[in-house]
Amino acid sequence: MWKNLPRGKPEATAAFFDNYNGGKDEFGREVLNPAGIDLTPAVARRLGLAKYENTYVYVSLPKRSASLER
């Protein structure tokens, strides 16, 4: 949907911090939380998060191999 955003940059983050799409989500609502990742309850527990805890989670991914690029 948001093809002009850099790969891996969530629209909510861009809207919140960069006023992307006028600071609105896909439904025209003002973005109040720049969350960009949803975790399953099991993953959240493994990270030590309490039920319904809201926090920043920093994620790093390995660079893609050139052989995987199409």
Image (cartoon, helix red, strand yellow):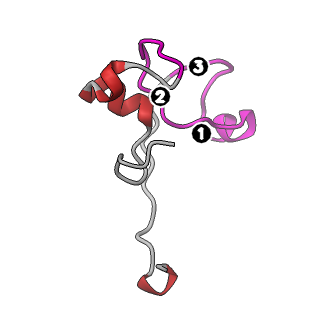
Q: Tell me the chief SS of the magenta region.
A: loop
Q: Is residue 11 left or right of residue 48?
A: left
Compute the Cα span from label 3 to label 1.
11 Å
Residue picked out by circle 3: 53
* Residue in view at x 45 percent, y 60 percent: 61
Q: Is residue 44 left or right of residue 13?
A: right
The residue closer to the viewer here, 28 or 61, is 28
| Amino acid type assigned to the residue bearing label 1 in the image | Leu
Compute the Cα span from label 2 to label 1.
17 Å
| Amino acid type assigned to the residue bearing label 2 in the image | Ala
The residue closer to the viewer here, 56 or 19, is 19
Q: Is residue 53 left or right of residue 58?
A: right
* Residue in view at x 60 percent, y 28 percent: 49
| Amino acid type assigned to the residue bearing label 3 in the image | Glu
The numbered mark, 3 or 1, whose residue comes first in the sequence reads 1
Residue picked out by circle 2: 35
Crowding at dot 1, Cα within 10 Å, few <14 / some 14-19 / many 20+, comes out as few
Compute the Cα span from label 3 to label 2.
13 Å
Which image quadrant for residue 60?
bottom left
* Span of residues in magenta: 27-54
Q: Please, what secondary structure does the residue beneath circle 1 have?
A: loop
> Among all residues in the image, which is located at the extreme right?
42
Q: Single out the mark in the foreground, 3 or 1.
A: 3
**Residue 32: in magenta span:** yes
Crowding at dot 2, Cα within 10 Å, few <14 / some 14-19 / many 20+, comes out as some
The numbered mark, 2 or 1, whose residue comes first in the sequence reads 2
Q: Are marks 2 and 1 in contact (CB under 8 Å)?
A: no
